[in-house]
Amino acid sequence: MLDSLRPRARRLAEWPARLLARTGVSPNMLTLVGLLLNAIVAAVLASGHPVAGGLLVLLANAFDMLDGALARITGRVSRFGAFLDSTMDRYEESLLYLGIGIWLFYRGDGSLLLAGYLAIIGSILVSYARARAESLGVGGEVGWLPRPERIVLLAAGLIFHSYLLAPVLWLLAVLTNVTAVQRILHVRRELESK
């Protein structure tokens, strides 16, 4: 379902990117602004405001699509820009989980803190497995839980934290790691068939 939404979301990001193109801001600047926005969201989460944090997660990560759209519109697509964007995405996701972790620590919720830790480990491994697969000449975009789906789930868990935070964090903890294993097995099959 979300796969069909991605092209629409990219098209939706084009009109604000066209406006930004007129300002002279670079795609890499937008990438760094996205990091700053996610740091602010992490502070909101750490201060114990999960509903506001969940809404801001959606906003900050929608903003994250603008750098790629701006790069395409202005003809400033670069390998370094793609690298910077991907690297900052890992920092952004880690900052969000840090904010959640601080909030859960002060709430005294050790089991959810563990779930969050396992979820961020899995999230980073999902991304690393894709990048490493592509460096070996194998497509790595397989599995159940790529980044957009993780962000939507996390935001929903935060917004409806009274009911959904625990199941969402545990779901992310399990499925991110399952996705990483799916990518490992996919790469193994692809490399053995060559």
Image (cartoon, helix red, strand yellow):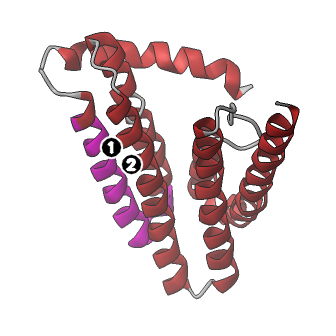
- In this rendering, position of residue 148 left or right of residue 70: right
Residue 160 belongs to the span the image colors magenta: no
Residue 33 belongs to the span the image colors magenta: yes
Give the vertical position of 37 relative to 173 (above or below): above
Query: What residue is drawn where x is 12% and y is 21%?
Result: 24
Give the vertical position of 23 relative to 132 (above or below): above
| Magenta segment main secondary structure | helix
Query: What residue is drawn where x is 71% and y is 67%?
Result: 166
Amino acid marked by disc 2 = Met
Give the vertical position of 24 relative to 149 (above or below): above
Q: Which residue is mark 1?
A: 34
Image location of residue 27, percent across then percent down: 27, 29
Can you see residue 160? no
**Magenta range:** 29-51
Q: Nearer the viewer, residue 47 or 190?
A: 190
Q: Which residue is mark 2?
A: 88
Q: How many residues crowd mark 2 within 10 Å: few (<14), some (14–19), many (20+)?
A: some
Image location of residue 143, percent across then percent down: 77, 40
Which quadrant holds residue 21? top left
Can you see residue 182? yes
Asked whether disc 1 touches disc 2, contact meaning CB atoms under 8 Å apart, the reply is yes
**Labels 1 and 2: the sequence-earlier one:** 1
Q: Secondary structure at mark 1?
A: helix
